[in-house]
Amino acid sequence: MNKLLMGAALSSVFCISAAVHAGLKVTPIQLYVSEKNNQRSATVTFDYTGSDAPKIFEATAVKWSQNEKGEDVYIPDPDILINPKNFVLQPESKQVVRVGFPQPVRAMNLKEEGTWRVIFNETPPVADQSAMNFLFNISMPLFAGEQKSASLAPSISYRANRLIVTLQNKAASHIQIKDLAIEDASGKAIATSNNMTYLLANKQNEFDMGQVKLESQQKYTLKINTDKGDKPLEIVL
């Protein structure tokens, strides 16, 4: 069954986006499997320190797509290979998990980048089933195929007196939008958005820049920080 994830989380689940939290370090935070050298898998390393209680994890995978509104859609995918799927992370220890495909990515003949998420759910110990625990829920992107150069097409509109920037990803692979700003001719930022999100291949999303009015006679530049390089993309509006 298709599942549309709207960003809500149970209070008993703690979702992390950083690589380190509460003694648990997870690297990398994104998985890439390329077409080079007949690659078919990548590895995740869990490094657990500073605690005397073990953690139990169960891993699953979902196919990741986006609808016309840019909302994430997840479908369970049992064909993704995860080894081990279940593991106990002991204090002061490491665990390596391999994630991949039954065949090399090159043999998959992808027309655009394939996207999944690998989800590591922490489960409470049997003895603590009734206790109140904060449990890790780690959702890690898995990308398969060739990484293309950034290609974004912006458009401007207004809704209820608010400036809306729509970004369309015209590349055949994802781009992560970290933040964006509109600068005037002097280089002053007049509107910003810190809505970090992914645009999958050939998808788009909207960014609410606030109650800002652009003057038609002025020149503006859209600066976008992404995962495609250290320098921001600059697009003249």
Image: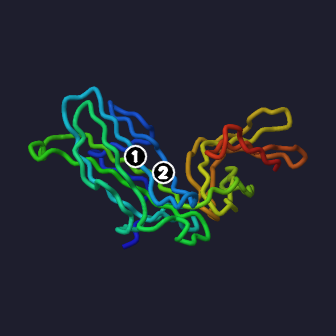
Point out residue 15 in the picture as x, y percentages from the top left corner: 37, 44
Indicate the secondary structure of the residue bearing disc 2: strand
Quarter of the image that includes the N terminus: bottom left
- Label 1: how many Cα within 10 Å (few below 14, some 14–19, many 20+): some
User: Mark 2 touching mark 1, by CB under 8 A?
Assistant: yes
**Which residue sits furthest front?**
37
Q: Looking at the image, is mark 2 or mark 1 earlier in the sequence?
A: 2
Residue positioned 65% across, 46% down in the render? 228
Picture layout, residue 30 above or below residue 5: above
Q: In this rendered view, identify the residue nearer to me: 148 or 193.
A: 148
Query: For the residues marked 2 and 1, what is the alpha-carbon distance in whole angstroms?
Result: 8 Å
Picture layout, residue 109 above or below residue 184: below
Point out residue 204 in the picture as x, y percentages from the top left corner: 63, 61
Q: In the shown orientation, is residue 106 left or right of residue 169?
A: left
Q: In the shown orientation, is residue 153 left or right of residue 110?
A: right
Q: What residue type is labelled 2?
A: Leu
**Which residue sits furthest top?**
50
Q: What residue type is labelled 1?
A: Val
Q: In this rendered view, identify the residue nearer to me: 23 or 103.
A: 103
Point out residue 213 in the picture as x, y percentages from the top left corner: 76, 46
Asked which quadrant contains residue 26, the reply is top left
Q: In this rendered view, identify the residue nearer to me: 133 or 105.
A: 105
Q: Name the residue under label 1.
A: 44
Residue positioned 29% across, 53% down in the render? 84
Point out which mark residue 31 bears: 2
Residue positioned 87% across, 44% down in the render? 219
Residue positioned 28% across, 56% down in the render? 85
Point out residue 96 in the picture as x, y percentages from the top left corner: 34, 45
**Which residue sits furthest right?**
217
Picture layout, residue 72 above or below residue 126: below
